[in-house]
Amino acid sequence: MLTDVLSVDLAKALEAVEGWLSDYIRQPHSELGRSGPVCPFVAPAQRAGALEVRVRLVGPTPSQTLIDEIVRCGLDEFSEVGWKDGNPNLRSLLLVLPDLPPEHLHLLDAAHTALKPESVRRGLMIAQFHEQCREKAARNPEFEVSYAPVPMMAVRSMAIHDVLFLADRREWFEEYAKRFGARYRSSTRGIDPVLTEMYERARATHESGS
């Protein structure tokens, strides 16, 4: 049925995404548990031309298999984008699913759970955003930070602050430590003390369990 695709107002959806980025993601929020914008990397990524927004239509019968495949393809696509020169740590790919209906938003949550191990092995992080998302802020478990007016999944390079999301599981922490452990061993100068504390606690926990 063609109306499922034709009824999607892509311009309106992308306008809503841009408004969300500028009015929410790039702004500070009193409930974050820290200073600075909701995501401190979006503004510099946009300035560097390192934020790619891609639309993916799911059609009239979205399934978990389909949503998982869209996200998995996003992981592959991340390495194939013709990124502009600059800091690779700013690279982000935003997969926008404007026709995913409210009753199927949970498929994004399930895709995040299923594919996070794969993304971490690749040195990437994924995060889902939608109107019903219950993901909490890393420093305030009372704040549901991942609200968005349009369903989407973000794929980005792993960053040093991701110890906040990777410390609990040994295999995730090991992937993190491969990439950032040398930073902590050489000098913690310039690293948020909260990150250092979490890194050392996770290292002690996982090493004692080996």
Image (cartoon, helix red, strand yellow):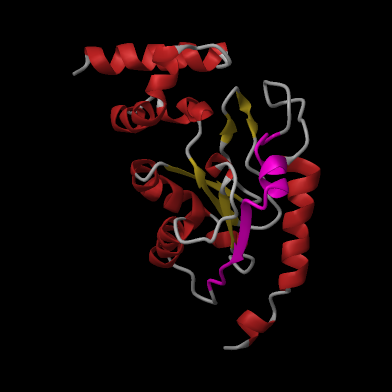
Q: What's the residue at 34%, 47% (across, down)? A: 118
In this rendering, would 41 be left or right of 164?
A: right
Q: Is residue 53 magenta?
A: yes
Image spot of residue 94 (x, y percent): 59, 55
Magenta-colored span: 38-58
Reply above or below: 145 against 142. below
In this rendering, would 192 be left or right of 77?
A: right
Image spot of residue 117 (x, y percent): 34, 43
Q: What's the residue at 59%, 56% (across, down)? A: 152
Observer-nearest of 78 and 126 = 78
Observer-nearest of 195 and 20 = 195
Q: Is residue 89 magenta?
A: no
Reply above or below: 15 against 191. below
Which picture quadrant has residue 71? Answer: bottom left
Image spot of residue 122 (x, y percent): 36, 45
Quadrant in the picture for the N terminus? bottom right
Q: What's the residue at 51%, 60% (across, down)? A: 81
Quadrant in the picture for the C terminus? top left
Q: What's the residue at 79%, 46% (across, down)? A: 22
Observer-nearest of 63 and 16 = 16
Which picture quadrant has residue 44? Answer: top right
